[in-house]
Image (cartoon, rainbow, N blue to C red):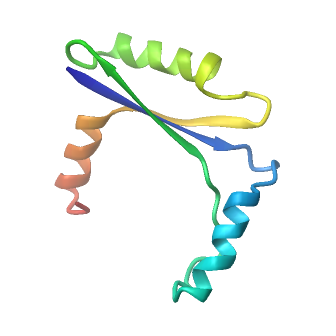
């Protein structure tokens, strides 16, 4: 069984009140190094079998048509979760 992750973010010109609220709270909690926050959505899609290029293409189409509102949101990533995790681990970030 494979899993695909889809990340959706508000377009840059769209106000993000949740991100603004988090950005205001971070310095009060000791995280002053962050100057801006944008909050988005993450979807995890499971498939029977491996994640193939065709599965990623279908996930991208679903992201554009169903998972996001193209008027105010951008699909910023569609990826195989296991491949992403292997990349992060090999780069020493995990």
Determine whether 75 is above or below 93 in the image.
above
- In the rendered image, is residue 36 in sight? no
- In the rendered image, is residue 87 in sight? yes
Quarter where residue 78 is shown:
top left
Image location (x, y in percent) of residue 90: 17, 53
Which quadrant would the C terminus be assigned to in this image?
Answer: bottom left
- The residue depicted at 75 percent of the width and 50 percent of the height is 12
Image location (x, y in percent) of residue 47: 30, 16
Q: Tell me: 55 left or right of 74.
A: left
Q: Tell me: 12 left or right of 43.
A: right
Question: Count of labels shown?
Answer: 0
Image location (x, y in percent) of residue 77: 49, 36
Determine whether 6 is above or below 63 in the image.
below
Quarter where residue 19 is shown:
bottom right
Which quadrant would the N terminus be assigned to in this image?
Answer: top left
Image location (x, y in percent) of residue 88: 26, 52
Q: Tell me: 88 left or right of 26.
A: left
Determine whether 58 is above or below 72 in the image.
above
- The residue depicted at 77 percent of the width and 36 percent of the height is 72
- The residue depicted at 24 percent of the width and 23 percent of the height is 2
């Amino acid at each position: 069984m494979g899993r695909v992750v889809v990340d959706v973010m508000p377009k840059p010109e769209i106000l993000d009140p949740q991100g603004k609220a988090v950005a205001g709270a971070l310095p009060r909690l000791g995280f002053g190094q962050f100057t801006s926050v944008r909050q988005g959505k993450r979807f995890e899609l499971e498939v029977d079998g491996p994640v193939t290029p065709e599965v990623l293409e279908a996930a991208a189409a679903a992201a554009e048509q169903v998972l996001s509102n193209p008027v105010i949101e951008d699909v910023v990533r569609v990826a195989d979760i296991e491949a992403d995790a292997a990349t992060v681990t090999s780069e020493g970030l995990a």
